[in-house]
Image (cartoon, rainbow, N blue to C red):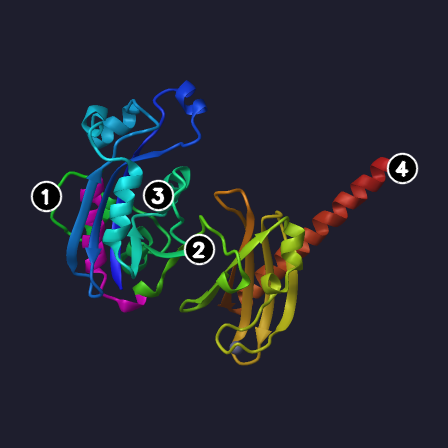
Amino acid sequence: MNYIVMDLEWNQAADTKTKLENELIFEIIEIGAVKLDEDRHIVDTFHELIKPQVFQRMHQITGELIHLKIEQLKSCRSFVEVMQDFLAWCGEEYRFCTWGNLDLIELQRNMEYYQMKPLANKPLEYYDVQKLFSIAFEDKKSRKSLEYAVDYLKIEKDKAFHRADTDAYYTAKIMERIEDANVLTHVSFDTFHLPKKRKDEVRVVFDNYEKYISQSFPDKLEAMKNRKVTAMKCFLCNGPTKRKITWFSSNGKHYYAVSHCEQHGYLKGKIRMRKSVHDELYVVKTIKLVDEVAVEEIRKKKDQVRELRKEKRRLKNEAKS
Ligand SMILES: [Zn+2]
C-alpha cells in the first residue's frame, strides 16, 4: 500500500453577495501530493493548479497567503479533469495522509459538487499527520502548525509554506521521520460518508481503547435504543461485562457508562452524538480501561445529574402550587 500525502489550497467568495449566491464555500484551486511507498520513501509527486469555475475573484486573505493571482489559474484544467488524473495517479491501494482533517472534507465536498463518484461509501481510513506528530513527539492532544513541526524536527525549510506542493512535501517529510511503528496504528476516520450498512460500521481497537462509529440515526433516542450503540463488551477479551453504571447524559451530547470485566477491570464508555457534513446524526463511542478513581468520578457526575433533575422537578411543582 502507498501513502498519498496530500495538500489542497482553496479559494472562497470575495464578498457576501457571491457567498450567498453559491452553494460551494471553498473551491479547490491547487492540489499537491507526494506518494510514499510502504517504507515511507518518496517515490513520486503530483502537482497541479485548477481553473476556478465558481469564484472568479481571489479572496484577499487567500491571495496573500498563497501568493496566487486568479489570472494564473484561468488557463488551467478544470477540477474534474485534474481529479480524474490525480485519482488514477494515486493507484489501486493507497491511504491518504493530510495535515489535520480539513483537506479530505473539502476534497469530497468539491467532488460532490461536481457529482463525481465518491471516494468511498463508508468512513475513509486516513492518517491525520498533525495528530501523528503530536502522538510521536508531543503530548498526543495538542495540534501544532505544519511549520512548528518542521522546525521541531529540524527539517530544512528550503521551500515557502502555504502552497499545496510544498505543504504536501513537508508533511511527507514529517511522515518519514515517525519511527515508532505503534504511532502508525493511530488511523483516523473521515466521516464525510457515514456507514450505510451495518457491516461498514467502524470498530477499531487501539492500545488502550476501542472506537466505534455508527450508521446514522433519526434522533438521539433511536440511537440510544440501538444495542450496538450501547454495547459494552470488553475489547481486550471480547467477553461479557457487568454493568456498573448505566448510560446517562449530563448535557444531551455526551453519554457515559461503566462496566466491569472480571479479567481486565473497569471499562468506561463514552458516547458522543455527532452531526455529519450532511447533517445526519451518528454516534462515536469509545470504550477504555479506567481505574476506580475514574469510576468514582463518573458516579459523582451521575449523582449530580440526578440531584439537578430532582431540584428542577421540585421547583416546577412549587411553581404549580
Ligand atoms: Zn476483558
Q: Are marks 1 and 4 in contact (CB under 8 Å)?
A: no
Whether residue 315 is visible, yes or no, is yes
Q: Do callouts 3 and 1 mark residues in contact (Cβ within 8 Å)?
A: no
Estimate the x, y position of residue 36 in percent, counting from the top left. Answer: 20, 58
Q: Which quadrant would the C terminus be assigned to in this image?
A: top right
Going from N to C along the chain, the mark reached first, 3 or 2, is 3
Disc 3 residue crowd, few under 14, some 14–19, many 20+, Cα 10 Å: many
Query: Which numbered circle lies on residue 123?
Result: 2
For marks 1 and 2 on the same chain, the one whose residue lies earlier in the sequence: 2
Q: CA distance from mark 3 to mark 2?
A: 14 Å
**Disc 2 secondary structure class:** loop
Q: Is residue 304 left or right of residue 311?
A: left
What residue is shown at x 38% (from left), y 38% (from top)? 114
Question: Where's residue 134, x and y in %?
Answer: 31, 55
Q: Residue at x 29, y 22 (%)?
A: 57
Residue 107 disc label: 3
Task: Name the residue located 17 percent from the left edge and 50 percent from the top edge.
Answer: 45
- Mark with earlier residue (1, 4): 1
Q: Quadrant where the N terminus lies?
A: bottom left
Q: Which residues are magenta?
A: 163-182
Q: How many discs appear?
A: 4
Query: How far is mark 2 from mark 4, CA to CA?
Result: 53 Å
Name the residue type under label 2: Pro
Please name whichever residue, 277 or 301, is drawn nearer the observer in this view of the structure.
Answer: 277
